Image (cartoon, grey):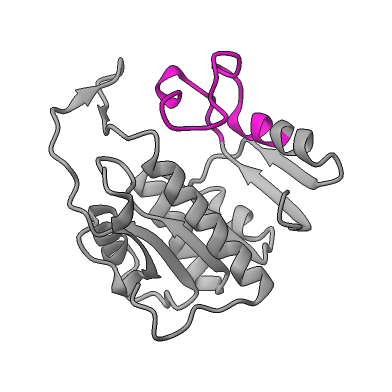
Amino acid sequence: MRAGIGHITVIDADVFSESNLNRQILATRDTIGRPKAEVACERALSINPYIDIEGSRMLVSQDTVAEIVGLGPDVMVDAIDTMGMKGLLLREVCSVGTRTFSSMGAALHLDPSAVRVGKLSETSVCPVAARMRKELRGCDTSNLTCVYSLEKPVKVPWERDDKGKSVLGSMPTIPAIFGMTLANEAIRHVLGIRRQTFLAL
């Protein structure tokens, strides 16, 4: 919306909750309980009323992943934090060759200087990246760029939500740095600006 991207489709089946307040810029007391895709579109239009943007509350699943990828985006940006859904999406985009920028694990990190950009095969340390390497074994991941951290996840006491699900803590800053890095890489790709091969990532 600020970089001249022609069309954006926002896909997220979730609604904002209080647990999002510490790290998601669109999460406020006023947006708790509202669909994330809807709020994201409203925010974009409030900045640029001429942007071509649409939201969808579709959930990534075995039943929907082909339809989502079949929308035919020039660029896919993946920020899914549920491993099963993430693996499904990345396997599908790799099978059709969609240029994709994917966030690995931002939770339990404190050091912004440890954030890196690279191919999935180049990732190390990050448990989410390790899981995705296993999930995508045998797939052509040449069109997949990852944002990950070289910092080992910090050890903190496990917390559980009201459904008994484990909750991984996040700093307010690190997920935002991952997101901005993903956006920057996607915009560079659209503009045709390639990373120099001599850079250490």
Residue at 73% over, 31% down? 42
What is the magenta range? 13-41
Relative vertical location of residue 136 with respect to residue 39 in this rendering, above or below: below
Relative vertical location of residue 23 with respect to residue 201 in this rendering, above or below: above
On the rendered structure, is 7 left or right of 126? Answer: right
Prevailing secondary structure of the magenta residues: loop
The question of residue 153 being in magenta is answered with no
To which quarter of the image does residue 198 belong? Answer: bottom left
On the rendered structure, is 106 left or right of 92? Answer: left
Instruction: Pinpoint residue 167: horizontal percent, then vertical percent.
Output: 27, 29
Instruction: Pinpoint residue 70: horizontal percent, then vertical percent.
Output: 65, 60
On the rendered structure, is 109 left or right of 1? Answer: left
One can see residue 41 in this view? yes
On the rendered structure, is 51 left or right of 127? Answer: right
> 193 or 8, which lies in front?
193
> 147 or 17, which lies in front?
147
To which quarter of the image does residue 138 belong? Answer: bottom left
Residue at 29% over, 59% down? 129
Residue furthest front in the image: 113
One can see residue 62 in this view? no
Residue at 42% over, 74% down? 141
Q: Quadrant of the C terminus?
A: bottom left
The question of residue 21 being in magenta is answered with yes
Q: How many marks?
A: 0
Instruction: Pinpoint residue 200: horizontal percent, then vertical percent.
Output: 33, 77
Instruction: Pinpoint residue 22: horizontal percent, then vertical percent.
Output: 41, 26
Relative vertical location of residue 87 with respect to residue 195 in this rendering, above or below: above
